[in-house]
Image (spheres, rainbow, N blue to C red):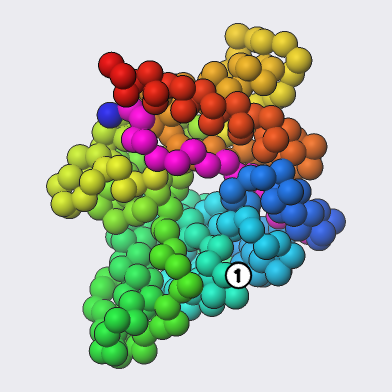
Amino acid sequence: MADYGQDILFGSFITPVNANPQHAVNMAVASENAGLDLATFQDHPYQPSFLDTWTLLSYVAAQTSRIKLSGNVINLPLRPAPVLARAAASLDLLSGGRFELGLGAGGFWDPIVAMGGKRLTPGQSVEALSEGIDVIRELWNTDTRERLVFDGEHYQLNGAKRGPAPAHKIEIWVGALKPRMLRLVGRKADGWLPSLGYLSSHEELRGMSEVIDAAAIKAGRDPKDVRRMTNVGGQFLNERTDKFLQGNKEQWAEELALLTREYGTSTFIISADQAELVEYFGTEIAPAVRERVASDRRDRSVL
């Protein structure tokens, strides 16, 4: 399937460097002022040149009023799921329902182990993420007063109290590229968040979406319930070029709309650490893309 008909959203992917601590905060504020829907931050807890992403998210939530916030993506091996569930719900309550939970299974295992984390095989990391999603959602579920007992390979809870419930239904977005992770996305996630730069071609998006769709259907889910997202990068130029996302506004609009029409992408998050680039993305690119996608959808509806 190509276009899933989802709302078209735009966001920023901000590097949380600590050399100038206010820069990442200012970028989030600039993202909100530019009309973007999301401000997201890398999460590498082992990186001493970065601010702690969770602390940053909390601080930014207090400096903004409309924009949604997320890690891109939160490092689950160093942030235990039960505590993360309470932290996420708390931030969502404090921000008025503006938090979404991007999750990653880990990948840089040497620094993770150096910080006290456990080294996992690729298969184990997927299993741990799957269990973590279950634990998080169960702790958010306050419709029952029954304490949570969870006997997993990676998480064991022996009568944990549930809550707090978040202010809104927090979506869980998973960064995934490999088949096992993609199948997990189809079974359990609300969104799929890859980085376009890691793909050798756009056609990979189609094949990956097909894996997600098949897993969703097998789990009794509608594939349309999985939001298709991507981190993008490029250059804003005054003229067109033959390079993807390196051209003028019209070229950017055409190429991002193509990703929606042909590959189902509905959320575009730009990697940018300059306020003027974020402003241009929000005020010029986003409206042009939305207009093209709306036109494409109107054309298809009359066929």
The answer to whether residue 128 is left or right of residue 77 is left
* Residue 148 appears left or right of 59: left
The residue sitting at 58% across, 57% down in the picture is 68
Task: Tell which of 157 and 140 is nearer to you.
Answer: 140
Q: In which quarter of the image is residue 152?
A: bottom left
Q: Is residue 286 left or right of residue 88?
A: right
- Residues drawn in magenta: 2-19
Above or below, 99 against 232 in this view is: below
* Whether residue 164 can be seen here: yes
Q: Does the magenta stretch include residue 269?
A: no
Picture coordinates of residue 83, whole percent (x, y): 47, 78
Residue under the point 25% across and 52% down: 187
- Apparent side of residue 255 relative to residue 274 in the rendered image (left or right): left
Q: Quadrant of the C terminus?
A: top left
The percent position of residue 240, horizontal first and vertical second, equals 67, 10
Residue 66's x, y, as percent? Answer: 64, 58
Disc 1 designates what residue? 95
Q: Is the magenta stretch mostly helix, strand or loop?
A: loop
